[in-house]
Each structure stands twice: as C-alpha cells, then as structure tokens.
C-alpha cells in the first residue's frame, strides 16, 4: 500500500514538473530611475515611462504571464 502511494506521488510530482517546465513568465524590472520618467531627459538617452509602458503592453499582448 505504501509503495503504491509513493509511486503515485512520484508520478504526480514528475508530471507536475514537466507541465511547469513548459511555462514562461516574463518579469519587467526597473532600477535606479532617479526621476528619469520623461523621454526628453539626458538628450533623449532616457527611455521614459511612456515608452516603457508601451513596451510592457506589447509584450503582455503576446504573453499574458507578464509582470
């Protein structure tokens, strides 16, 4: 009885790992913004929040697992 239980448990865990391995999650991260929210900062070198939001929306349209 115990061998069957552990065998079934291992089978479920392996199946779960194979399903989870196929998932893709995209995480956007920013660091050290220091008021560089406008696209006109630093002679156009800063990305700005509007461009960043557009990039995130584009990726979210293709992959719903985007944070």
Image: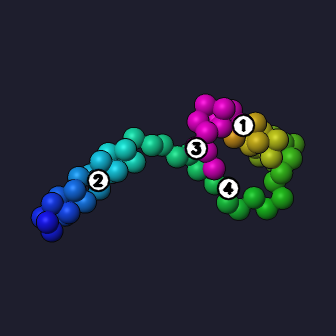
Viewer-closest of 15 and 45? 15
Instruction: Give the SS element for disc 1.
Output: helix
Pick whichever of labels 4 and 1 is earlier in the sequence: 4
Residue at 87% x, 43% y: name it. 40
Residue at 79% x, 62% y: name it. 34
Q: Is residue 43 visible?
A: no
* Residue 65, position as x, y percentages in the image: 58, 44
Cα distance, mark 4 to mark 2?
A: 38 Å
* Residue 49, position as x, y percentages in the image: 80, 46
Instruction: Give the SS element for disc 4.
Output: loop
What residue does disc 1 label? 57
Q: Is residue 63 magenta?
A: yes
Cα distance, mark 3 to mark 4?
A: 18 Å
What residue does disc 4 label? 30
Pick whichever of labels 4 and 2 is earlier in the sequence: 2
Cα distance, mark 4 to mark 1?
A: 16 Å
Instruction: Give the SS element for disc 3.
Output: loop
Snapshot quadrant of residue 51: top right
Magenta region: 57-67
Left/right of residue 51 with respect to residue 4 in the rendered view: right
Residue at far front of view = 1
**Do callouts 1 and 3 mark residues in contact (Cβ within 8 Å)?**
no
Q: Residues within 10 Å of mark 2 (few under 14, many from 20)?
A: few
Cα distance, mark 1 to mark 3?
A: 12 Å
Pick whichever of labels 1 and 2 is earlier in the sequence: 2
Cα distance, mark 3 to mark 2?
A: 24 Å
From the image, state whether disc 4 or disc 1 is nearer to you: 1
Instruction: Give the SS element for disc 2.
Output: helix
What residue does disc 2 label? 12
What residue does disc 3 label? 65
Cα distance, mark 1 to mark 2?
A: 36 Å
From the image, state whether disc 4 or disc 2 is nearer to you: 2
């Amino acid at each position: 009885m115990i061998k069957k239980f552990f065998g079934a448990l291992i089978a479920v865990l392996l199946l779960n790992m194979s399903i989870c391995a196929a998932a893709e999650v995209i995480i956007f991260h920013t660091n050290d913004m220091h008021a560089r929210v406008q696209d006109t900062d630093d002679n156009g070198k800063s990305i700005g929040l509007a461009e960043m939001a557009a990039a995130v929306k584009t990726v979210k349209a293709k992959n719903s697992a985007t944070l």
